[in-house]
Image: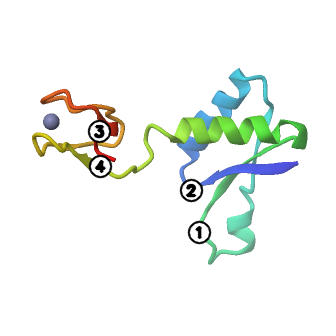
Amino acid sequence: MKMVFSSPDTAELELLKNVLLKAGIRAVEVNQQLSQVLPSVPFQAELWVEEVDYTEAAALMAEWQKPSATGTPWVCPRCGEKLENQFSKCWKCGTRRDAVE
Ligand SMILES: [Zn+2]
């Protein structure tokens, strides 16, 4: 098996496990005991999947993390409005983002 995701946030892990399950991928949570064996290591829960499912699972993880990913905000070249990464055009004046580059 292969680790596809790790996080100290078990709620997030649980959510991602469901995302994988919906896609028909069986994911297992690993490592609960680790923090007892090595008390100095911060708790980190992991999601493991079968190797055959790994590529698909990794793609799903990447997809899932995209919206919340801390992308760089951009500034509208026309009106100077500062916009979050997920917006493809300026909400104020309608200038498209790709006009920037
Ligand atoms: Zn604008």
Three-letter amino acid code at disc 2?
Answer: Pro
Q: Say which amino acid is labelled 4.
A: Pro
Q: Is mark 3 within 8 Å of ligand 1?
A: no
Camera-side residue: 101 or 66? 101
Indicate which disc residue 99 carries. Answer: 3
Q: CA distance from mark 1 to mark 4?
A: 31 Å
The residue where tag 4 is placed is 73
In the picture of the structure, the residue carrying the numbered disc 2 is 8
Secondary structure category for the residue under label 4: loop
Residue 86: give its label: none
CA gap between label 1 and label 3 equals 44 Å
Give the alpha-carbon distance from disc 2 to disc 1, as whole Å: 8 Å
Q: Along the polypeptide, which appears first: circle 1 or circle 3? A: 1
Q: Earlier in the sequence, mark 2 or mark 1?
A: 2
Where's residue 93, x and y in %? 13, 29
Quadrant of ligand 1: it is: top left
- Give the residue type at disc 3: Ala
Q: Nearer the viewer, residue 98 or 70?
A: 98
- In primary-sequence order, the first of circles 1 and 4 is 1
First in sequence: mark 4 or mark 2?
A: 2
Per the image, label 3 sits on a secondary structure element best described as: helix
Q: Are circles 2 and 1 on residues that touch, CB within 8 Å?
A: yes
Label 1 SS: loop
Residue at the extreme bottom? 40
Label 1 Cα neighbours within 10 Å, binned few <14 / some 14-19 / many ≥20: few
Residue at x 71%, y 68% (from the top left corner): 36
Name the front one of labels 4 and 2: 4
Q: Is mark 1 within 8 Å of ligand 1?
A: no
Circle 4 crowding by C-alpha within 10 Å: few under 14, some 14–19, many from 20 = few
